[in-house]
């Protein structure tokens, strides 16, 4: 199937597609690529590339472009690391993005490094949404995933954060995330997770598992018929040193497509990354090595402009 025909099949699809091609809907920034955990279902512990922390000048260059081009772009404050390892530098980075007018600044964290002072600073920074990656209702399941004994500590830190949010009368959105890994969670665990956290002022979020370009062996088939990867159409991934990675699942950055120290988000999105998106629209997945054997293309639903409309 040539998905370009679907795009051209309706005015709405054409409008949505053309808007998407102007600037990436989401920018993922590798502010730090260090992590305080070695989770069993994450590619981080397999990384061979150099880790580092993004410089403030490079970070400001990225934020300034987003502010000018589309302040409603989703900004994710970490790519492949733990955001709170930056402590108050992360707070400063969030504040800078908000002062430049960005409307959707989000952060994922495993929650281990939170304390009262840091929680207050994050809330006061203007962060729009924080996502706590907990992934389990039972401590036994948490240990299988996270490979550590911090389950009760993280639960306490999350609850404390929620209380501080109430005390400060903040409208920051709080999500508690569970990644559904086939065969891992106990019977009824996901429902118990949602019921437990549903009593708090949070959103519970189920997320599809990732194999991180096949490095994690997970038995599970979501869809049989392949469609263009929404990672390519939704996200723009930047490493700590300004390299642009074609795929957010490519933990070792084997498919670098640009360098923001010498180029812009807009130009890379509309040139090198666009060429890869074109290959996907023509179902020529095997013409880019990182896509050829990929199992994570369906971890996002198909993009709206690639759906046939009556």
Image (spheres, helix red, strand yellow):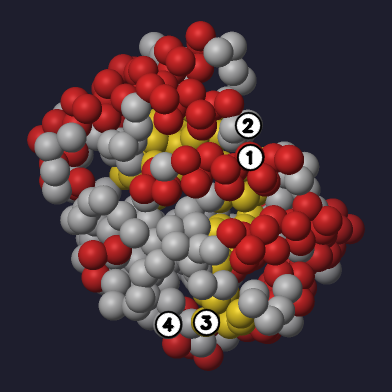
Of badges 1 and 3, nearer the viewer stands 1
Q: Position of residue 266 (x, y in %)?
A: 76, 70
Q: Position of residue 46 (x, y in %)?
A: 24, 70
What residue would you read off at disc 4?
254
4 or 1: mark nearer the eye: 1
Upstream in the sequence, badge 1 or badge 2?
Answer: 1
Q: Mark 2 falls on what kind of element?
A: loop
Q: CA distance from mark 1 to mark 2?
A: 6 Å
Residue 221 or residue 212, whichever sits in front:
212
Asked if residue 33 can be seen in this view, the reply is: yes
Going from the N terminus, do you reach mark 3 or mark 2 first?
Answer: 2
Q: Which mark is residue 95?
A: 1
Foreground of the two, 178 or 119:
119
Residue plotted at (31% across, 17% down): 196
Q: Which residue is mark 2?
A: 126
Q: Tell which residue pokes out farthest to the bottom in this image.
A: 287
Question: Is the Cβ of the residue at disc 4 closer than 8 Å to that at disc 3?
Answer: yes
Which residue does the numbered mark 3 point to in the structure image? 256
Q: CA distance from mark 3 to mark 2?
A: 32 Å
Residue 151 x, y percent position in the rendering: 19, 31
* Residue 17 or residue 107, whichever sits in front: 107
Q: Cβ–Cβ below 8 Å for labels 2 and 4?
A: no
> Label 2 near label 1: C-beta < 8 Å?
yes
Q: Residue drawn at (19%, 47%), measured in percent from left and top? A: 145
In whole angstroms, how far apart are the C-alphas of marks 4 and 1?
32 Å
How many residues crowd mark 1 within 10 Å: few (<14), some (14–19), many (20+)? many
Tell which tag, 1 or 2, sits nearer the viewer.
1
State the residue at coordinates (71%, 79%). Answer: 263
């Amino acid at each position: 199937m040539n998905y370009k025909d679907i795009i051209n099949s309706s005015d709405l699809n054409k409008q949505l597609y053309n808007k998407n091609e102007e600037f990436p809907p989401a920018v993922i920034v590798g502010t730090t690529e260090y992590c305080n955990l070695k989770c069993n279902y994450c590619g981080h512990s397999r990384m061979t590339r150099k880790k580092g922390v993004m410089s403030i000048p490079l970070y400001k260059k990225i934020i300034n472009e987003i502010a000018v081009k589309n302040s409603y772009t989703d900004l994710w404050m970490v790519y492949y690391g733990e955001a709170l390892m930056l402590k108050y530098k992360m707070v400063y980075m969030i504040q800078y993005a908000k002062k430049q007018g960005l409307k959707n600044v989000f952060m994922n964290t495993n929650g281990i490094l939170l304390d009262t002072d840091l929680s207050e600073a994050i809330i006061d920074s203007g962060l729009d949404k924080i996502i706590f990656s907990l992934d389990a209702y039972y401590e036994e399941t948490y240990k299988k995933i996270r490979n550590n004994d911090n389950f009760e500590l993280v639960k306490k830190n999350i609850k404390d954060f929620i209380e501080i949010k109430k005390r400060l009368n903040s409208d920051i959105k709080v999500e508690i995330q569970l990644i559904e890994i086939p065969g891992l969670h106990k019977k009824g665990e996901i429902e118990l997770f949602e019921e437990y956290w549903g009593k708090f002022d949070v959103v519970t979020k189920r997320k599809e598992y990732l194999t991180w370009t096949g490095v994690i062996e997970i038995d599970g088939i979501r869809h049989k018929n392949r469609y263009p990867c929404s990672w390519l159409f939704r996200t723009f991934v930047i490493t700590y040193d300004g390299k642009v990675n074609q795929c957010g699942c490519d933990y070792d950055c084997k498919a670098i497509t640009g360098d923001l120290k010498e180029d812009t988000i807009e130009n890379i999105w509309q040139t090198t990354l666009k060429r890869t998106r074109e290959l996907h629209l023509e179902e020529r997945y095997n013409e880019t090595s990182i896509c050829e054997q990929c199992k994570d293309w369906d971890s996002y639903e198909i993009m709206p402009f690639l759906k046939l409309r009556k």
